[in-house]
Amino acid sequence: MMKRKHSMTAVLFLAGLLAGLLILASSFFGQEGKLETLLKNFVRSGDVTALVTGAEGAANQDLDRSHFFIQLFGGVQRLMGRRAIVDMAEADYTVVKMDDGALTFENLSREPVDVTPHGEALVQLDRALRDQFDLPLLYIQAPQKASNDALPTGVTDYGNGYADSLLSVLAENGVDYLDLRPGMEAAAAQPDAPAFFFRTDHHWTPEGGFAGYQILSRCLDEHYGMEAPALFTDPDSYEKMVYEDYFLGSQGKRVGTLYAGTDDITLWKPKFETSFTYSVPLNAIERTGPFEESLLFPERVAERDYFGGNPYTLYAGGDYNLARMTNHFNPDGPRILLIRDSYSCVLAPFLALNCSEVVTIDLRYFKENVLDYIEWLDPDLVCVMYTASSTRLPELFQFFGAEEKPGFRY
């Protein structure tokens, strides 16, 4: 009799747990699922056998079958109020929930590291460009998503401190830089400002990338004489198609949709006429057409696929070793070489509007001699844009003598 009592208690507990999960699931999926129907029938009938035998099949129909346990685990963690979820397979990718419910990766470096060598590497690059090619360098500091005042107690992020230290080295050595953080913080504080970062991913949204582009465009005009029409930086010059609940980011994929929900992503289409060729030689990609067909990849949002898709690559297609964006309507514009990481995916297409050509290099994959390529390309400006958040500063610095420091990761 005692065993039966305990069994019934366990079943009722699990039923209550599943009911809580289904409340979460309904809020995300917007409709009653098989599990919710099963539980309602159990409440009415008390048929434990029907509940137990039907639960697995109903769950597999409601949730992505191959990721059911990620979904279930994330849902349970949310019900328990957990703010940090350790990834047992890859501890570097422990997910932390910030005060506003958005996710970030925890910085596992318990003590800050010295980024002075990385700043000195940029100084060396600046001097090489000026001495060999009489060519300016502009370092662009992208903002990061995490901030210490939004993290749980006991979790520290050093990203903004790293950025400040890096920029101080550049300032001391006369290297031009543009810090996007103050301008974007001011823009984000405006009434009805859109989210500049995805809820479930560490990257900025198209709205965030466009805000960064607006600041960069002003800088190029004021300091380098690279003027562009005002309509390019006017958000009203674009049609916007919102794909609702379409994106589960790199942090969200580790904890499932039930833990922090999903993200919308917006396709920005110029209302003005455009024509580009986008070529990625190593990947045999060449696309010619208007902005939204050449520089954007609408096929990346052709269907919703939370775990298998990456709608972020709607912009620029993703991270390629070398890519060229040729603007057929601005043949006399500047040619800019942008040394970049994944944050530039959403910014580079907008920047291409201002230029005759934007060439992007991702040094995680580009293994040629950078200076030799610059000599051949003959750009008007070299830009380097990275975030100094809890990610490892990339291979650029190894090209100029800086050793990789522990505590950084992509």
Image: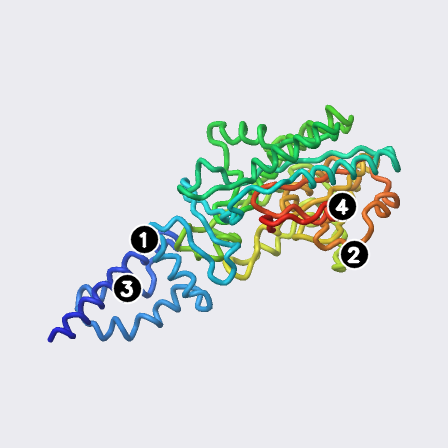
Q: Mark 3 touching mark 1, by CB under 8 A?
A: no
> Of marks 2 and 1, which one's residue comes earlier in the chain?
1
Residue at 56 percent across and 40 percent down: it is: 159
Q: Amino acid at mark 3?
A: Thr
Residue at 32 percent across and 53 percent down: it is: 79
Q: Is residue 376 left or right of residue 96?
A: right
Residue 133, quarter of picture: top right
4 vs 3, front mark: 4
Q: Amino acid at mark 4?
A: Gly
Q: Mark 2 touching mark 1, by CB under 8 A?
A: no
Query: x, y percentage for residue 356?
Result: 80, 39
Quote the CA–CA distance across marks 3 and 1: 24 Å
Determine which residue is flagged by label 4.
Answer: 401
At numbered mark 3, what does the secondary structure look like: helix, strand or loop?
A: helix
Determine which residue is flagged by label 3.
Answer: 37
Quote the CA–CA distance across marks 4 and 2: 29 Å
Q: Dot 2, crowdedness within 10 Å: few (<14), some or many (≥20)?
A: few
Determine which residue is flagged by label 1.
Answer: 80
> Of marks 3 and 2, which one's residue comes earlier in the chain?
3
Q: Is residue 336 left or right of residue 155?
A: right
Query: x, y percentage for residue 49?
Result: 22, 75
Query: x, y percentage for residue 141?
Result: 64, 36
Residue at 36 percent across and 67 percent down: it is: 59
> Of marks 3 and 1, which one's residue comes earlier in the chain?
3
Q: Amino acid at mark 2?
A: Pro
> Of marks 4 and 1, which one's residue comes earlier in the chain?
1
Q: Is residue 405 left or right of residue 84?
A: right
Residue at 51 percent across and 31 percent down: it is: 188
